[in-house]
Amino acid sequence: MYWRYALIWAKPADRGEPGAQRGCIRLDGGQCFAPKWPGQHRPGRREHHVGVYKEILFEVDDPVATITLNRPSSLNAWTDLMGAEVRQAVAQAERDPRVVGIVLTGAGRGFCAGADMSRLSAVSDGDYSAGPALPDDLASGPGDPSFGDDLHAGTHTYLLSVPKPVIAAINGPVAGMAVPIVLACDLRFMAADAVLLTAFAQRGLIAEWGISWLLPRLVGPAAALDLLFSSRKVTGTEAAALGLVNAALPGDEVLAHARQYVRDLAATSSPASMAVMKRQVYQQVHAGLLAAEREARGLMLESFGRPDFREGVRSFVERRPPRFERLP
């Protein structure tokens, strides 16, 4: 059975949208946490890179990688192709030593209206076929398997296993399956007047794509069930008050704020430390307190031997900004 979509309120897609070229890069499956040593990368170098896809835009402007869902005429409704392109762009950013953090946003006036309605209509009519085959050159393996299958093996929740910060810059409406996707990002900045709604119950569906795990951990079971049962519209302002997003901002400041957040991290925070912290936080959600403390003790001892620890102490003593090496 073909159940890769959850429903929302988008119109059928217009296939003649901007960014309709295709150019993809095959990535290998290698993954390494170790930072590159001096001479291999110069932090702060302002190389500008743009990757060309059909349904997303991808660019790297050191230290930020930006992935833009690019089907604005359908409020960036999600398709299999878009999902595959996002996965490959995330994998590419993960392996790029210039990238400290990844920002996910939407083109036009919306972030993502959820699943493409043309596909949902077909499914509702009993067509469970897999749809058009995806290009072989979009095969990719984002995320670090050492985070464990719970975090790495999900269709969209693999974002939790990417060892770099992933930030959702929610510039407009976000609905249906797009909600668990943004909840799988590490941080969320949302336009104050944008709206979020789950939409599943209104379409006879269930809490899809791990949202039944993600949402209660952010807002608690009662608030989570309210949002799932009623599918009421939640503004960015209310979402911030609930703890669903980190901040509500004027719409024209959301993307700039997310990018600046990454730049601030690049200037002050160890990428290696952030990678370990991310794995700690998400793995230890499943563990008890004692196990978390014991693991932290071992990781702390490991951190004492890393160059980032020496640089962090020296920069503090010398009263200067730290110069941490980037991840490969």
Image (cartoon, rainbow, N blue to C red):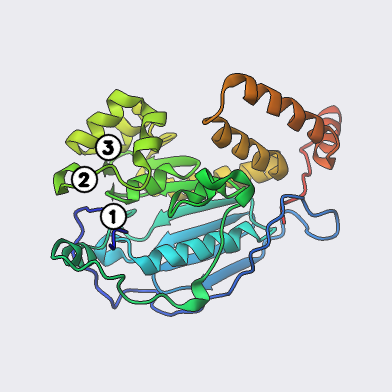
**Is the residue marked by circle 3 packed among few (<14), some (14-19), or many (20+) residues within 10 Å?**
many
Residue 13 sits in quarter: bottom left
Q: Percent from the top left, x then y, of residue 281?
A: 57, 33
- Residue at 83 percent across and 32 percent down: it is 304
Residue 231 sits in quarter: top left
- Tell me the residue that label 1 is attached to: 114
Q: Nearer the viewer, residue 260 or 208?
A: 208
Q: Amino acid at mark 3?
A: Thr
- N-terminal-most mark, 1 or 2: 1
Residue 195 sits in quarter: top left
Quadrant of the image containing the C terminus: bottom right
Mark toward the viewer: 2 or 3: 2
Left or right, residue 59 beside residue 171: right
Q: Percent from the top left, x then y, of residue 254?
A: 42, 46
Distance Cα–Cα, label 2 vs label 3: 15 Å
Left or right, residue 140 beside residue 5: right
Q: Percent from the top left, x then y, of residue 24?
A: 52, 76
- Tell me the residue that label 3 is attached to: 235
Q: Which mark, residue 199?
A: 2
Q: Nearer the viewer, residue 278 or 315?
A: 278
Is the Cβ of the residue at disc 1 closer than 8 Å to that at disc 2?
yes
Left or right, residue 80 beside residue 15: right
Q: Percent from the top left, x then y, of residue 58?
A: 50, 65
